[in-house]
Amino acid sequence: MLRIKGLTKRYRTGDLALKGIDLDVPDGEVMALIGPSGAGKSTVIRCINRLVEPTAGTVTLNDTEITTLGGAELRRARRRMGMIFQEYALVERLTVMENVLSGRLGYVGFWQSWLRKFPQGDVDEAFRLLARVGLDHMADKRADELSGGQRQRVGICRALIQNPDLLLVDEPTASLDPKTSRQIMRLIKELCAERKLLAIINIHDVCSPSGSSVCNLARSSMTARRRTSRRRS
C-alpha cells in the first residue's frame, strides 16, 4: 500500500505547489491523478520517489517511510518504484535492449554497469518484456530510430524490469497522438493488472484508463475521489 499524509511542497520562491495531500492507494490499484495544468500532479509523483523533496508530510510504501530515507537506503527504496516519463528519458545512442536493461542498474555492480554486462536472467526478462509490448524485433535498434509510441513502450519495459512494487507514470501520452495515447494507456493498465501492480498515473482526464480510481487535484489540494468504469475504444 502507498500512504501519503499531509504532503506539502513549497518552493524557495514561496510558491505553494502542494498543500496537505492525503491519499491511500491499496496494492493492485491503478490510480489516475487528474487536474488542470499547474495543479501539482507531477509534483505529487516526484515527491513520492523524492526526485522533488517534500516540504512536509510523509510518504509510506508498504512498511517503509520514504520521506525519512537518505543515501543508500533511499537508493534501495527507489529500486521498488518504477517510473515512466513524459519525454521517455531514453539514451538516444543506446539500443532498445540497452535502454531496457538500464532499469537494472541499481542491482548490478559498478563495473558490470560500466561495461553493460548484465546477468542472463535480466537479458531474458528484457526480451520477454519487449515481446509483451511488441518490440522484440527492435531490440538492436537505436532509441533515436523509434517513433514516439515505440519509445514510450521501451520506457514501460525499463520501468517494469525493475520488478517494482509501485509504478509512477508522469503524463505518458502528452507527446503522442490520440490513437497511440489510447494504446499506451490500455497497455499500461493491462500490464499493471497482470502484475497486480500498484500505480499512480498523472494523466489528462480524457485519457484516464477505464476502471481505474480517479483523484482530482485542483489548486494544490486533493478535492475529489471517484471510480470510473467508462470504456474507451
Image (spheres, grey):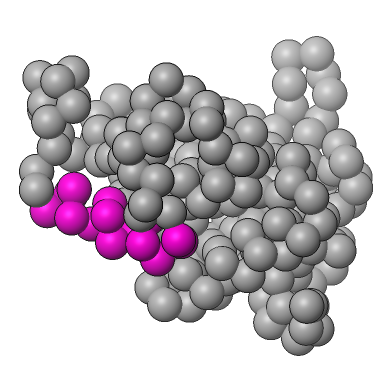
Work out whether 146 lies above or below 204.
above
Q: Which residue is drawn at 38% across and 73% down?
A: 195
In the rendering, at what x and y percent does residue 121 appear? 12, 53
* Residue under the point 80% across and 83% down: 230
For the record, the magenta segment spans 121-134
What residue occupies the far top of the structure in this picture?
Answer: 13
Q: Is residue 110 above or below residue 84?
A: above
Side (left or right) of 91 relative to 147: left
Quadrant occupied by the C terminus? bottom right
Lateral position of residue 1 relative to residue 161, left or right: right
Report the front residue among 123 and 56: 123
Task: Let me know if residue 124 is in the magenta part.
Answer: yes
Q: In this view, does 210 lie above or below 73?
A: below
| Magenta stretch: dominant secondary structure | helix
Residue 129 in sight:
yes
Which image quadrant is residue 93 in? top left
Q: In which quarter of the image is the N terminus?
A: bottom left
Residue 198 x %, y %: 48, 67
Residue 81 visible, this angle:
no
Point out residue 30 in the picture as x, y percentages from the top left corner: 59, 70
Image-based side of 117 in relation to 45, left or right: left
Estimate the x, y position of residue 217 in percent, counting from the top left: 82, 54
